[in-house]
Image (cartoon, rainbow, N blue to C red):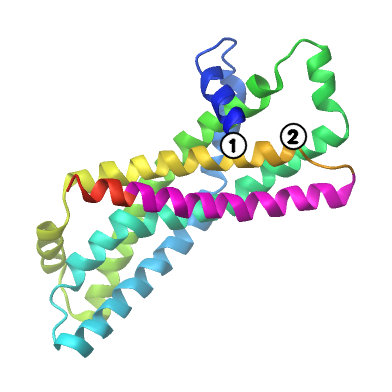
Amino acid sequence: MISLFTETFLGVFRPPFRKKEFFQQLHFVANTSLAIIVFCVSFAAIVTILESSFHMKLVIQNDSMVPGFAAVLILRELAAIVTALLLASRIGAGYAAEIGSMQITEQIDALKMLGIDPINYLVVPRFLASIAGTMMLTVIANVFCLLSAILVSQLYLGFTFGMFISSMHRFVHFQDIIFSMIKGACFGAVIPIVASYFGFNCKQGAEGVGHATTNTVVLASIGIIVVDFILSYTFSHIY
């Protein structure tokens, strides 16, 4: 897998540059995933702010810090990690099934016989599209998370829009957005590498494809959580 990542990363800078495949994969990653991600992260934000308010009232009898606390949690962790895990399930399984099917039907061997590098043709466009798409979806997820939190704060917690923004301003900084985008890019890089690895090593038959997709979702999710820990620990020394 490390070898595959190295070859893919080097392949980004080697011609031919497959722009058509890149935009096709970007559409698959970003456009077709947008609705489900917005839906899920919005409800995750609603649960987060309601639970934060409940427990703050329970412990310190005051929930005035809820908007700021929720905004920090959303920008630093929630939006990026939920987006990445949803994409790992959706596009990771799709990539593994697609490449695995090509492997067991000997389409990968056919590409090699035609002098086409399978990594350059299959992995590199998916790698770049996943990074770009996950970054964009992370930003959109942040926006909808905050909008959902603001709406719930107004309807159920008694915070006005101005109060929410004022409280958020004391906790949130512009670098939080940048760090969130960096996380999105790193998470996006994990998914196609894991999926391509299991796809290229897929065993014969429908059962082999099923195992490849299952292993991809599990290992990509674990990889995302581990990378999130490493990045969060690193960023904690920068704040």
Q: Nearer the viewer, residue 210 or 132?
A: 210
User: Answer yes or no: do the residues labelled 2 and 1 have beta carbons within 8 Å?
Assistant: no
Residue 156 location, quadrant: bottom left
Tell me the SS state at disc 1. Answer: helix
Q: Which is nearer the eye, 123 or 197?
A: 197
Tally of numbered discs: 2
Left/right placement of residue 158 relative to residue 10 reads: left
- Residue 184: within the magenta? no
Residue 83 vs 27, above or below: the answer is below
Residue 28 in view (yes/no): no
Q: Main secondary structure of the magenta part?
A: helix
Where in the figure is residue 224, as x and y percent of width and height? 48, 50
| Residue at 14% from the left image edge and 86% from the top image edge | 60
Question: Looking at the picture, does residue 205 appear above or below residue 152?
Answer: above
Residue depicted at x 60% and y 28%: 3
Report the quarter where the N terminus lies: top right
Mark number, residue 193: 1
The disc label shown at residue 200, or none: 2
Inspect the image, locate mark 2, and give the three-letter code of the amino acid beneath it.
Answer: Phe
Q: Which residues are magenta?
A: 205-231
The vertical placement of 224 against 102, above or below, is below
Q: Is residue 49 visible?
A: yes
